[in-house]
Every structure is written in structure tokens, then in C-alpha cells.
Image (spheres, grey):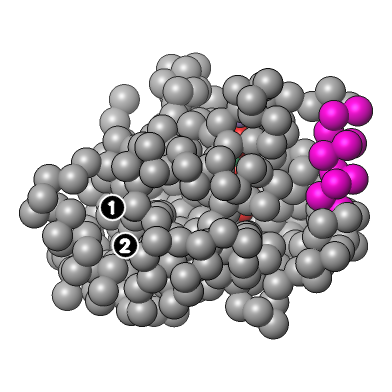
Amino acid sequence: MHLQVHPEVADALDAGRPVVALESTIISHGLPRPDNLRVAREIEDAVRSVGAVPATVAVVSGVPCVGLDDEALRTVAEDDEVVKVSARDLAVVVARGGHGATTVAATSHLAALAGIQVFATGGLGGVHRGARDTWDESADLTTLATTPITVVCAGVKSILDVPATLERMETLNIPVLGYRTDRFPGFYLADSGHPVTWQVESPGEVAAILHARAALECDGGLVLANPVASDHELDRALHDSVLEAGLAAAEASGVRGKDVTPFLLDFFHSATQGRSLEVNVALVKSNAVLAGQVAAALVA
Ligand code: PSU
Ligand code: MN
């Protein structure tokens, strides 16, 4: 087995040009068909719009791929055999020759292996509501604690226990920087209601912090929290009522474990008649652009 790095991505990495990793769970399990394939291409275009090379990560027929051609992207978006793959699942899916859509955790692992330093997604996984009983905490957090990657995201998904997630990130030594904000973003909402410790104003400032981390031999990743533009965010009252209904529906249908996040995102998309989908797409594209700018500042 070896990592298959798309030639365009490999060339960019060799030449010291900016590269941004993108995850694929959002394509297969986070966005509804048929919009997901179009949106996946649009996210890649957003990375290109600022002169960086996109590297969407997935396992295709047992091959861990960093950078997908159009056929592979279509497989991730449309094939019913694609499973959600976290870091611990990677080896199983590779050994079995299956298709896997990588979460933030699995994408971070493969991207770092390929030498990519910046990664864009929508919302990070974290501590679920009710985790005190279920112990459901995304492996995104523990993976970021040990994997050298910068994740640009709109905070953690608002379906989660946000303050508990912030506490866990502190314990795990994962720095959280607010991009032009001192509020931790709430995914569909620009402000989760919680502060961030550090605010940064430019991609260059993020790059300087990453260079300092390298010099200090700080292990692990960093979260750059980029709020959705206020004219794109979901109506707060709508958000709160749909979330309440979604959590109740998940409970009533006995949804557990790795199915919880896809279930709730899908619930939002149908209960808001696509409004949450628009927000989700807008924030991912904005994160892709910022990640491209950070990647460029890093290699400058
Ligand atoms: N962000 C989105 N949509 C998604 C996800 C993040 O806008 O679908 C995915 C990511 O792949 C993240 C995963 O790693 O949800 C978290 O799942 P879990 O809570 O089961 O760890
Ligand atoms: Mn979980």
C-alpha cells in the first residue's frame, strides 16, 4: 500500500506552492445528493481561486488518495458503498479494498502524511450533547492533538456541546484562533455564544504563529475558526427550534455513534428546506479560500 498523491498536488508540494487538503465525509455524508458533487467541485474551485491547489482526500478501491480526479470525486459523491472513515477505520478499509470518505480525523492523518499543512472543512467534530452518558466525542479532537495540521473551520458543529468541546481542546493542547473575531463561531451561526482566547487578523499572522510553533516543537494541530459571514448565517430562532427537534428525532430513532452527525445534518437540511445547506456551502467555501491564503502565506 502506498499513498497516492495526485500529480498536480505532488508537483505543488515539491515546488513549495500552496496546497489545501479537503475532506470527503462532508461530500458523502454531510451534503445531500445530487448537490454534493457540484458542491465538492465548487469547494475545490474556491481553493484554486486564491492560487492554491486543492487535495481532496478519500480512500478509493482501497487506495488512500490525496487529490482526486473527477471520476474519484464522483465515486465519493455517488457510490452507495462509500463508508464514513475515521482515522481508526483507515487501515480496515484500505486492507479490504473498499471506498471510504474521510472525516476530519482521517483526512488530517493522510494529509499530514503527504506533507500538507493546511486543511479546510465546514465544522469540526467535538463533544456531543449528552456525552456525559454516551461518551460520544469525535476522534477529530484527539487526532488534532497529535497531528501537525491547521484546520480552517467555522468552529465546531452547533449540534454539539460547544463549551465542552472548547474545554477538551484546551486539555488536548489544540490552539484555537478566531479569524477577525473574538467569538468562537457556531457553524450555522457566526457566534456560538462563547469567546476564543486569541484573535488573528491576517493569513500572515497565522503563518507566523505556525512558524513559531514549529520552532518551539509544539506537537499537533491548530484550529483556525472562521465565522460564516453574518449575511449568510442561519436565522437563530430557526436554528434553535430545528436543533431541538433534530436531537429529539435522533433520540427517538435510536441513532448512535458515527451516524449521529450525518443524521442531524440531514435533518437540518430537510427541516430548513435547504436553507442550512446554503449556509453550509457558503461557510465551507469561505473556509477553503482562507485556507488557500494561509497555505500561501506559509510558503511565502
Ligand atoms: N463538517 C461539515 N459536514 C460534515 C462534517 C464536518 O460541514 O459532514 C463531518 C466531518 O467529516 C467530521 C465529522 O470529521 O462530520 C464528524 O463526525 P463525528 O461527529 O462522528 O466524529
Ligand atoms: Mn462520535
Using the rendered image of the protein, determine whether residue 6 is visible from the camera's viewpoint.
Answer: no
Quick one: 137 or 262, which is closer to the camera?
137
Density class for disc 1 (Cα within 10 Å; few <14, some 14-19, many ≥20) is many
Residue 102 location in percent, x, y? 51, 39
Q: What residue does disc 1 label?
A: 116
Residue in the picture at 33% in, 79% down: 202
Residue 46 location in percent, x, y? 50, 73
Q: Quadrant of the N terminus?
A: top left
| Amino acid at dot 1 | Ile
- Disc on the earlier residue, 2 or 1: 2
Where ligand 1 lies, by quadrant? top right
Quick one: 248 or 287, which is closer to the camera?
248
Q: Which residues are magenta?
A: 242-252
Q: Which mark is residue 19?
A: 2
Mark 2 and mark 1 in contact? Answer it, CB < 8 Å.
Answer: yes
Query: Relative to 121, is 261 on the left or the right?
Result: right
Mark 1 residue's CB less than 8 Å from ligand 1? no
Classify mark 1: helix, strand or loop. Answer: loop
Question: Is 75 in the magenta?
Answer: no
Classify mark 2: helix, strand or loop. Answer: strand
Using the rendered image of the protein, determine whether residue 215 is visible from the camera's viewpoint.
Answer: yes
Mark 2 residue's CB less than 8 Å from ligand 1? no
